[in-house]
Amino acid sequence: MLNKRPEGSFSGMVKIWFGTRGIHRNGCNPAIAMSSGINLPKLLFVSVGILCLNTPRSGAEDRAGEDWWSLQPLLKVVPPDNDQEHVIDSFVARKLREHGLEISPMASPRAQMRRLYFDLVGMPPSVEEVRAFEVDPTDETYLRVVDDLLASPHYGERWARHWLDVARFGESDGFERNSPRNNLWPYRDWVIKAFNEDMPYDQFARMQIAGDHLRPGFEGMSAVAFLTAGLHNTVIGSSEFMRRTARQDELEDITGTVGQTFLGLTVNCARCHDHKYDPISQREYYQLASTLRGVYRREQEVEDSTALAQKVAAGKRLDEISKRVGEIEKMGRERVLFRRAGSEEVKAPALPQPLARWEFEGDLKDGLGGLHGKVMGGARVENAALVLDGSSGFVKTEPLAGDVTEKTLEAWVQLDTLEQKGGGVIGLQTNDGATFDAIVFGERTAGAWMAGSNRFERSEVHGGAPEQEAHKTAVHVAIVYQADGTITRYRNGLPYDQSYRSKIQSYAKGQAHLLFGLRHGTKPGAGTLLRGRVLRAQFYDRALTPGAVAASAGAESNFVTDTELLSSLGPTERKKRERLRAEAARIREAIASIKGSKRKVYTVRADTHPGPARLLERGHALKRKEEVLPGGVATLRGPSAQFGLAANAPDAARRRKLAEWITAENNPLFTRVMANRLWHLHFGQGLVKTPNDLGFSGGTPSHPLLLDWLAGKLRENGYRLKDMHRLIVTSRAYRQSSRPSEQAGKVDGDNRLLWRKSPVRLDAESLRDAMLVISGLLNRERGGPGFRDVTLHNNNGTTYYFPFDKEGDPNLNRRTIYRFSPRGRRSTILEAFDCPDPSATAPSRSVTTTPLQALALLNNDFALRMARGLARRVKDETGNDLRRQVERSFELAYGRNAAEKELRLAVEFATEHGMAALGRVLLNSNEFVVLD
């Protein structure tokens, strides 16, 4: 017997009244209901010992309070004790009997097979598979089919499609430009793989929130593309208000998707004010958004996980050695500096002489040469400083008078605000703006100085501390580029972080110039301009020594030469240092020799230090109020909403903590939402009608105890989804007939009580895939870039997508999940059958009935091609016998033999119009399109 309910009865159980609209909607929990004797009509059965706590804020008729049902801990449910063999059926039968109804008889074997195949793998069974079950329709045979389908690679393809709807997976940006995303497909492949491997759902969720930190490399970067799969506005204007508003819109999309997907809460509705219907404050929205504040998006090359793991392991050993070498060198430097302090012969180093100097004394002239500046946009000279407005202003100098390779960039700068990103202080670039080296603020790490360069070719981040003072006082910043490629950053005359080696970039006479205020380019763009004042700047055509940089900045140099260092070490220390340095060199060579494959993926570009978040008054991007700490939603009865993180915590800590909080074992929403989502996808509607909203607007569940029992079972099974599928599809509720009943329809017209299995029309992708299967044209190639049944046309920066179909291209016959899916335009047949546009999360698809659907199946190029393919297939399989061709067509389309009358009429039709025309008729029938 399949999933037989556990032994036991309702002894030891207590009855609790549950109101028609739900006791939690009426502002009381089960314990309160029992103690106050509330007289409500429906029974709940809950095991003794469940503690229901009073809450400080109750709901009302028009909103939920903290006592709302979905926010409470999972109930420890004991299934009802009745005559049902399957545990799910015991819940369903009890509810039906309360209304004088019964579960319907079993569906026919053919209906069960079609239902099962389309639900689990999204494609129809063959007539041979149907007949095999008709011959032996036992529970054991049925269970073997279930297990075979769950083991099929097509299972992951089917269920990944459901998930991509929720993840608003779209392979173009949307909005005005709608540029294609050519490398978002690795996320789709990762989801398919995760479903096929039965990755535990809690791990599946964590990877999509923080996979780049949890598992660095291609796998983690592919998984976390969940966060960036949504719309992206690339035309946001140049004003600060528009830029900030666009960023807040982006954060709302990401935060809202995370909240709805994993918590079933529309947290994004609290961006401008406290949530109107759920107990979520505006502060809590910004707490949650703060955890995702470091998420930006970019296509990037990512190394495979194996090679990256090898490099990380070698890097740890290298760090250990570097630490030991550093301890030895620290002792030597301290000895040298101690001797210097006691020497009367120590002289201050001479100030270095630059190639160019700008002091901004009323103009932009170079005080040493001819690299005079020219104002662009809103830049101006005022009070002996170059004032940069951050929206349009920058300065461009005359071209170089000679070639430059080694160089030093240096400036004294005061920022208007530390909360800016990507502006250049001083930089050197080619005249076309394509190649550059610059001092840049906050581009890859919030608040940090970096060596900006074209495509980050000469840019690395090694942990320089975020700036804390430059908005209060001027700071000295410099970057030195040595001939061997070594790049060193300085702040106030001292090294900002460790040097690194790259490739030196040369600039030719007359082919390059310097910039102030603009990172690079020939005109301003979003995130490229600096807001602040440059008080002085200098440019050198050579690499300054650390002592020279310190002297120029007015700092006391603590630089010690290698000769001085070695002379201060004893023989044993020198030998130990050399041995460790040699081992470090070998490890660096080994790291360089690790050759992992690199692949492009459109994913998260993390801002490692995104800075504090602030609550915005009425959501206005420029009306920033107090800081908020990264955190969650306090009304959840389970994990603490206080993450224990500082306002300026790094991105990795924020998203790791968010992932842990969401997937915490005592988070009741995490498991309730997924249990309800699974039920919805198997039955056509969830126990709660709105899969993404278990708040007030979603209402109460039709079977609250069944929902909590399923959620508890999901947790008990280690969050394995295949076990849940097996449990659901083996129930009588799932396998029952879809035949209508006049009596039951009067009692429960919407079938919320599950007195029958509601008929379901195939979704657009399953319909297309089924047509490919029966025509014999399906290309089962899995993974990789999607096939394109659209042509791309670029007009003035905007991309347009035009669907097409043609004979002879096997790529166009792959499963629909492997289709390149741009926003705004789907193929006609997909659009006609309610395939959603991925501009927003689509947890529940619309099911419309329109004349266009029949016309699409009759006249669409794809449908015509499938009908021709079916005609060729049946002829190849049966020869020239027209009657046998018609019989085979019915077998392939419907999984059954044609009735004698059907056969006679179909032969007559095919004789007159041809087998391709008959194929169009069969594909355009309810029996093909609807699952009973």
Image (cartoon, grey):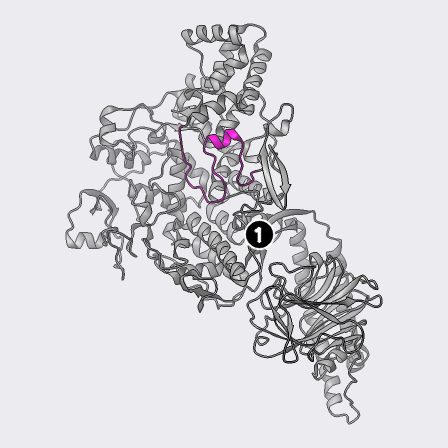
Camera-side residue: 907 or 92? 907
**Residue 520 sits in quarter:** bottom right
Q: Residue 5: horizontal and vertical position, in percent?
A: 32, 36
Residue in view at x 50 percent, y 34 percent: 158
Q: Residue 807: horizontal and vertical position, in percent?
A: 63, 23
Membership of 31 in magenta stretch: no
* 22 to 723, vertically: above or below: below
Membership of 823 in magenta stretch: yes
Label 1 belongs to which residue? 234
**Residue 776 sits in quarter:** top right
Quadrant of the snapshot with the N terminus: top left
The magenta stretch is 821-849
Q: Which SS class for mark 1?
A: loop
Residue in view at x 37 percent, y 20 percent: 108
Q: Residue 694: horizontal and vertical position, in percent?
A: 35, 47
Camera-side residue: 377 or 166? 377
> Is 350 left, or right, of 609 in this rendering?
right
